[in-house]
Image (cartoon, grey):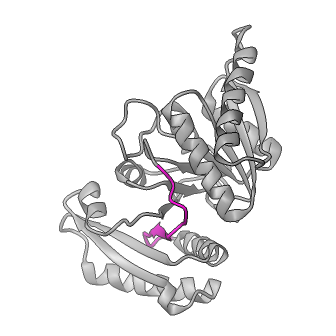
Amino acid sequence: MIGQHVLAGYATGAGGRDALRLALAVVAHTGGRLTVAHVHPPDRPAAAGEALTVLKQAEELLDEAAPGLGADYVAQEARGVGRGLSTLASRTGADLIVIGSPEGGAHGRVAIGAAADNLLHASHEAVMVTPAGYEPPEKLGRLTLSYVRRPQADEAVQRTAQAAVALDVPLRLITLAVGDDEPRGRLRDDLALAIRFAQESSGLPAEQVTAEVAEGDDVADALADVPWPEGELLVLASSEDASAHQVFLGEMALKVLRAASCPVAVLPRGYS
């Protein structure tokens, strides 16, 4: 999730530009390496040449935004964008795939197209999705982990806390209480244990870790119940149904992702 090697999926249009801007911001924070990829279909003779034209456009945008960055540009042939990006990430050793939201979604919200759907159910690398029209701030402000106590929850807490230390930002843990069925006291007790584990597993000082119960009638209401200042990054863990070292989002997590107003990073199960 820290992004030592970031792979940005680029296509013409707003979503491609959003992904490029977010990938550039990640690399600026981490000092990592950036690869920009355009995936094209294998059954159209002109597609490979068109892909090079698209990548040239991406290179011009990056040269304008960050002169001298030195990114790599790769045209990848595949029958689906998500599949192509995942294949390329495995081949190049990228640890984070960044994609934008497709055209037609609500401004400031994450939309899930075919590429995101594939990656969010099959990628072996962490996946970061940007809301439509997102403009990254100059500084990352905080990592927020959506926490649900379950067998692999400690793994997500530990990895996110370690990332917070590496990026020198605070960590917030939030648990969603949707409707009236969830006992708030138990949720707060779970968060208290998670805070302690975050500190013990990463060395984060006490003042750098906070927790909140986000309450609402539905997921969108619950997320709106807590503040989301500029510079926030939301982290989701994969479902317990995910295979080892693979992303798989369950129904609740997908609702959280769609309601998010900031970029969302999704960790594979067993992410290290």
Magenta part, dominant SS: loop
Q: Is residue 163 above or below residue 234?
A: below
The reply, left or right, for residue 227 in relation to residue 115 is: left
- Residue 43 in sight: yes
Residue 116: image x %, image y %?
53, 39
The reply, left or right, for residue 193 in relation to residue 199 is: left
* Residue 117 lies in the magenta-colored region: no
The reply, left or right, for residue 209 in relation to residue 32 is: left
Q: Look at the image and tell me in which quarter the N terminus lies.
A: bottom right
Residue occupying image coordinates x 44% and y 51%: 250
Q: Residue furthest top?
A: 45
Image quadrant in which you'd find residue 79: top right
Q: Is residue 168 above or below residue 145?
A: below
Residue 251: image x %, image y %?
39, 49
The reply, left or right, for residue 129 in relation to residue 49 is: left
Q: Is residue 242 above or below residue 14?
A: below
Residue 258: image x %, image y %?
38, 47
Closest to the observer, 254 or 265 = 265
Residue 206: image x %, image y %?
50, 92
Closest to the observer, 136 or 76 = 136
Residue occupying image coordinates x 78% and y 48%: 68
Residue occupying image coordinates x 48% and y 90%: 207
Closest to the observer, 192 or 258 = 258
Residue occupying image coordinates x 42% and y 54%: 253
* Residue 140 lies in the magenta-colored region: yes
- Residue 2 in sight: no
> Which residues fall within the magenta stretch?
135-150
